[in-house]
Image (spheres, rainbow, N blue to C red):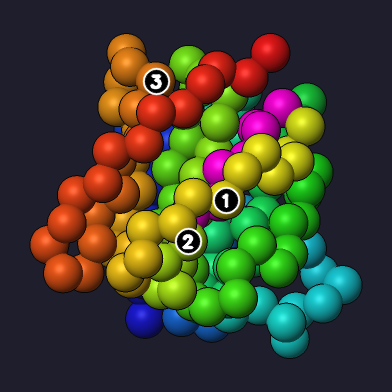
């Protein structure tokens, strides 16, 4: 069962994640399978893909699974994606959302427990943990502004100021 999808460069590629934790790249024009993005050493550990983000400027694919694991893939010279980061244990409850700001070099992930992790996307280090108090449904950066929005289950929309990473 497909659980997440994201278009890639110029909408020519389509990344699809499923309930089994698989992440695959397809041609958006023909539907042809191109490659699987997944390290082979620990296949049994992967869980449902919750969110996929394609980062155009750096040619990265970010993949977050329901258990809070975030994988960062980079396209190498031979046009294959290689795992460059495997971030585990980011949340203690199920991951609900993830977003990326190319402008501020930040990545945010949210969870059912009401916390939002803000990571430096250059060093992939935790910058801060924000508390929403309620289950966070999703998070989004506001383009052009140092602002992170969090949508909560009870209808609240929270607005957090963020600072750009050096």
- Residue ID at (73%, 86%): 44
Residue 117 on the magenta segment? yes
Q: Earlier in the sequence, mark 3 or mark 2?
A: 2
Residue wearing tag 3: 146
Question: Is 37 colored magenta in this rendering?
Answer: no
Contact check, label 3 and label 2, Cβ < 8 Å: no
- Say which element carries label 3: loop
Task: Compare marks 1 and 3 and give the one earlier in the sequence.
Answer: 1
Helix, strand or loop at label 1? It is strand
156 left or right of 69 in image = left
Q: Which mark is residue 115?
A: 2
Range of residues picked out in magenta: 116-122
Q: Which residue is mark 1?
A: 129
Question: Are there few (<14), some (14-19), or many (20+) residues within 10 Å of tag 3?
Answer: some
In percent of width and height, residue 80 lies at: 71, 41
Residue visible at 43% across and 43% down in the picture: 99
Pointer 1 and pointer 3: residues touching (CB < 8 Å)? no
Would residue 138 be seen by someone viewing this image from the given angle? yes
Residue 115, position in %: x, y?
47, 61
Where 30 sits versus 148, above or below? below
Q: Are marks 1 and 2 in contact (CB under 8 Å)?
A: yes
Q: Magenta stretch: dominant SS?
A: strand
Q: CA distance from mark 3 to mark 2?
A: 19 Å
First of labels 1, 2 by sequence position: 2
User: What residue lies at 19% left-to-right and 49% top-to-bottom?
Assistant: 157
- Disc 2 is placed on an element classified as strand
């Amino acid at each position: 069962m497909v659980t997440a999808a994201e278009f890639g460069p110029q909408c020519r590629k389509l990344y699809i994640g499923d309930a089994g934790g698989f992440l695959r790249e397809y041609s958006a024009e023909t539907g042809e399978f191109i490659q699987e993005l997944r390290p082979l050493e620990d296949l049994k550990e992967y869980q449902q893909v919750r969110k996929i983000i394609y980062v155009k400027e750096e040619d990265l694919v970010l993949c977050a699974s329901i258990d809070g694991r975030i994988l960062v893939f980079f396209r190498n010279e031979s046009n294959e994606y290689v795992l460059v980061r495997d971030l585990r244990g980011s949340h203690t409850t199920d991951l609900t959302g993830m977003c990326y700001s190319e402008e501020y070099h930040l990545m945010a992930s949210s969870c059912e427990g009401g916390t939002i992790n803000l990571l430096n996307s250059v060093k992939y280090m935790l910058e801060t943990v924000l508390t929403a108090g309620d289950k966070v449904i999703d998070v989004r950066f506001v383009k052009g502004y140092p602002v992170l929005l969090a949508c909560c289950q009870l209808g609240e929309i929270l607005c957090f100021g963020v600072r750009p990473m050096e």
